[in-house]
Amino acid sequence: MKTIILIAALLVQGLAAKHLHREKVYQRAFCDRVHGRMEYRLRDGTRVDCQTATYSFEVDFGRHAFESVGQALYYALMTGKRPGIVLIRETRKDDRYIGRVKRLAARYGIYLFVIDTAFRIRAVKLPQYHKPTTKEIR
């Protein structure tokens, strides 16, 4: 009986796995492609997922898109580099997060990439940012 419960628990745990690959696997694939340095440590102990000569990249799953904006901007501030985000697209559901973060990336000058489960990387074309006028805000 204990064996059956153990096997059932292991099967449920395996089915409950949320992602095809761990974040670090995608991070390594991207960082290797752009010849960056993984886990670049900042003075305050935080780590940039991938640091290049000109960019500080945050790599995260699509559903963490909004968190990645803040992290990318913080890393850029701390390093003097430009901010970048690499969103991981494992399913079509991730497209909604990518779509939502595009306007923020355009507004704050964040270079946005997407990496998929086959480790294909593409730059995301950003919309032109429209700065609202005072009349539009009222």
Image (spheres, rainbow, N blue to C red):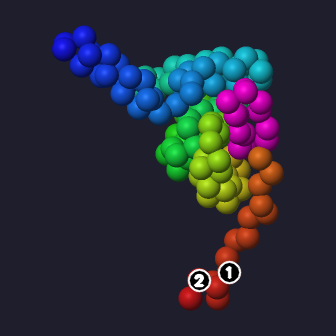
Residue 77 spot, x, y in % from top left: 57, 39
Q: Which residue lies furthest to the top in this view?
A: 3
Q: What residue type is labelled 2?
A: Ile
Bounds of the magenta span? Answer: 111-123
The C terminus appears in which quarter of the rendering? bottom right
Q: Which secondary structure dominates the residues rendered in magenta?
A: strand
Apparent side of residue 66 relative to residue 3 in the rendered image (left or right): right
Q: Give the quarter of the image for residue 61.
A: top right
Q: Residue furthest front?
A: 1
Characterize the local packing of mark 1: few (<14), some (14-19) or many (20 or more) Cα atoms within 10 angstroms. few
Residue bearing mark 1: 133
Say above or below: 137 vs 121.
below
Nearer to me, 135 or 93: 93
C-beta proximity under 8 Å, tags 2 and 1: yes
Apparent side of residue 29 relative to residue 72 in the rendered image (left or right): right
Write the residue at 64% across / 88% down.
135
Q: Give the quarter of the image for residue 52.
A: top right
Q: How far apart, in angstroms, are the residues tagged by discs 2 and 1?
A: 7 Å
Q: Can residue 53 be seen in this view?
A: no
Residue 131 spot, x, y in % from top left: 70, 71
Residue bearing mark 2: 137
Residue 47 spot, x, y in % from top left: 51, 24
Residue 113, magenta (yes or no): yes
* Kind of element beneath mark 2: helix
Write the residue at 63% across / 25% down.
26
